[in-house]
Image (tube, rainbow, N blue to C red):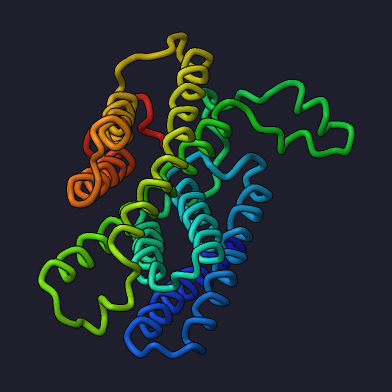
Amino acid sequence: MILSLLFFTFSFVFYLLTALLYVGNWVFKKKWLGQTATAMSIVALFSTTMILIVRAKESGHAPFSNLYESMMLFVWAVNVGYIAMEYKYKFKVMGVFVMAFEFLAMLSASLLPYKFKSAEPLNPALQNKWHWMVDLLSKIGYEKYAIGWLDFHVFTTFIGYAGFAISCGLSIMFLLKNRAEEKGGNNFLLDAFPESKILDELSYRTIAWGFPFLAVGIVSGAVWANYAWGTYWSWDPKETWSLITWFIYAAYLHARVTRGWRGKKAAYLSVAGFAAVIFLYWGVSFILPGLHAYA
């Protein structure tokens, strides 16, 4: 427990420094600041990876079983997605907004009560492991690290959330850039952004990438629910809001493909979708308790 919290402290500082470095690169446009920011994002990713590894070793199960652990998975997934995008598209200014989300996520996790951070045995409803994986890992003495439907459900869902978080950051950038383009003139900060049409396209691509993961997460969650509670769907608040979130992003993709929605409409819907994700994750957990209360 102490070791995972130590890595959490390191990660908290690393994400703060990373966010500040990306802001510094945006404002001062110094190449070394951008290079240092990228390096720090990789260091922060390594530290977050160590949180998950150590947490798994401390608890004896996949580190996705409560609010704190799943938040670390979210931070890890967003960072992986961002680093991949920066490598492919070379737009370091995206890091200003994405790493701000990362730091806020770390800050939120740091404010959780201690009971959410302690490594506890799994709730009996969560103890369902794939037998074929148990048999496979038992041959090398690591059968306790086998995963089940819960782990698969949480992992795929949070990969989807990561895509939506990055898309939200890109959509905010689009709205700022689009407004500057409509007004004309020069703005030394917004001039560093890619063209609005590029931001719009990247936002769409990240949603198109994250949406299938959310869909798989919902389906795998239904399978797990049937195992744990004897029913695939019970209209639990978490289930209901996950479906609402799915519909928002399904509407985004449908409107984009069939109605040609682009620009402001698409950006506002992307931001609304991520707001639904935040409420699904935080609001439902504390305001609308249900079968997922232990999450």
Measured as percent of width and height from the top left, residue 29 is found at 39, 88
Can you name the residue that lies furthest to the right here? 139
Please state if 6 lies on the left or on the right of 138 as rendered. left
Identify the residue at image location x=49%, y=28%: 216
In this view, the residue in front, 260 or 136, is: 260
Q: Is residue 289 visible?
A: no
Position of residue 89 measured from the top left corner of the image (x, y, whole percent): 49, 64
Percent across and percent down for residue 9 are 50, 70
Above or below: residue 193 compared with residue 153? below
Seen at 75% across and 28% down, the residue is 133
Work out which quarter of the rendered image holds the C terminus and state it. top left
Quadrant of res 126: top right
Q: Is residue 180 left or right of residue 192?
A: left
Q: Residue furthest left?
A: 183
Q: Is residue 249 visible?
A: yes
Name the image quarter holding the N terminus.
bottom right
* Residue at x 59% of width, y 66% of height: 47
Identify the image quadrant of residue 238: top left
Looking at the image, is 196 positioned above or below residue 200?
below
Q: Answer with the quarter of the image where residue 195 lies.
A: bottom left
